[in-house]
Image (cartoon, grey):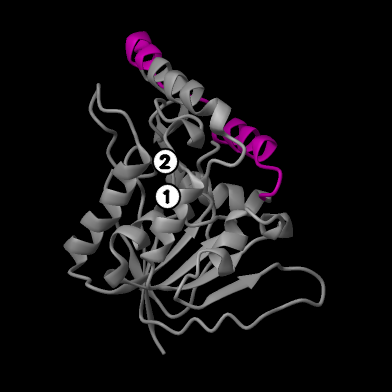
Amino acid sequence: MDFHYVAMDFGGHGLSSHYSQGFPYYHQNFVSEVRRVAAALKWNRFSLLGHSFGGTVGGMFSCIFPEMVDKLILLEALPVVLDTNEMDNLLTYKRRAIEHVLQVEASRKPAQVVSPEEMLQWFLKNNSHVDEACGKHLLQRGTTQVATGVSLNRDRRIILPEYCLDIVSRELLVQYIKNLQARILLVNQRPSAASGLHSPLNILSGGAQVPPPLHCIHPGPGTWQEPCLPGTRLLSTGVQKAGTHGGKSQPQGGTLHTLWDI
C-alpha cells in the first residue's frame, strides 16, 4: 500500500514564515495551521502523527475536528496537556510568555551567526538523544546559510513550549476526549505516564469512557505490540524550525524528530 506523507513546519519554525511583530505564538494558532494545510491539500480525512509538542497540537486538532482524523499517532505525547502538576504555575507561564515576546521585539538583536560545526556541536550538546548524522539532517532545515556561517530559522520569540500550551483541567480533558473519533496509538518511553488514578493515560484508557480504540506501546527489550496503522494519508505535526509548508510522497515512513529545543 502506498502512503502519502506531508511534514509541515509550524509558523516560526523550519522554512515557515515568522508571525508579524505583536502577534504571539499560541497552541491554538498551530492547530489552525494544521486545518489550513488540510484545506490547501483538499484533504477531508487523514491520519495525524505528532511528536512531543506536535502531538499535543495533533491531539487538539483531533478533538476539534474529529470527523477529519482517522488515526492519531502520538510519540512521547498525549492529546492534551493536563494541569495535574501545573496549576500553581499557569499564571507565571502566561506572564513570562508576554514579557519574553516584548523583550525580544524590543531588543531587535540580529540573529546569531556561527559556523556550521559550532551550530552542530551546540545542537548535539543540547539534544543528547540525537546522534551526529541526525543532527546534521535536522539542521539542514533548521538553519539558513549566510555569508559568514549559519543562523537558526526559528523565531526567537518562541521559547519554552509551556509558554504557549493550552493546559486544561481534568474536567475539560474528559469533555475534549469524549469528542475523539480517531483510533489512537500512544508510543511512550516513559510508562509512568500510565500510573495514577488521575493520570491522563488512565483517563484516556477508561476513566473517561473514550469510544475509539486506544493502543499503547512502551518500547523496550522484548516488548512490542502490533500498532495496526494502515492508511493512505498522514499529516505530520512535528515541530521543525520555522514559513511555508511542504511535503512529498514516500513509499514508507521515516523518523520524526522535534527541533523545538534548538
Give the Cα separation between the discs numbered 1 and 2: 11 Å
Residue under label 1, please give it.
Answer: 172
Q: What element carries label 1?
A: helix
Residue under label 2, please give it.
Answer: 166
State which quadrant residue 192 falls in: bottom right
Q: Residues within 10 Å of mark 2 (few under 14, many from 20)?
A: some
Query: Horizontally, is 142 left or right of 246 in the view?
Result: right
In the image, residue 161 sits, relative to residue 171, either above or below, namely above
Query: Horizontally, is 203 left or right of 242 in the view?
Result: right
Q: How crowded is mark 1: few (under 14 residues within 10 Å), some or many (20 or more)?
A: few
State which quadrant residue 227 falls in: bottom right
The type of residue carrying mark 2 is: Asp
Residue 65: x and y in percent read 28, 63
The extreme top residue here reads 107
Query: Horizontally, is 104 left or right of 217 in the view?
Result: left
Part of the protein shown in magenta: 102-130
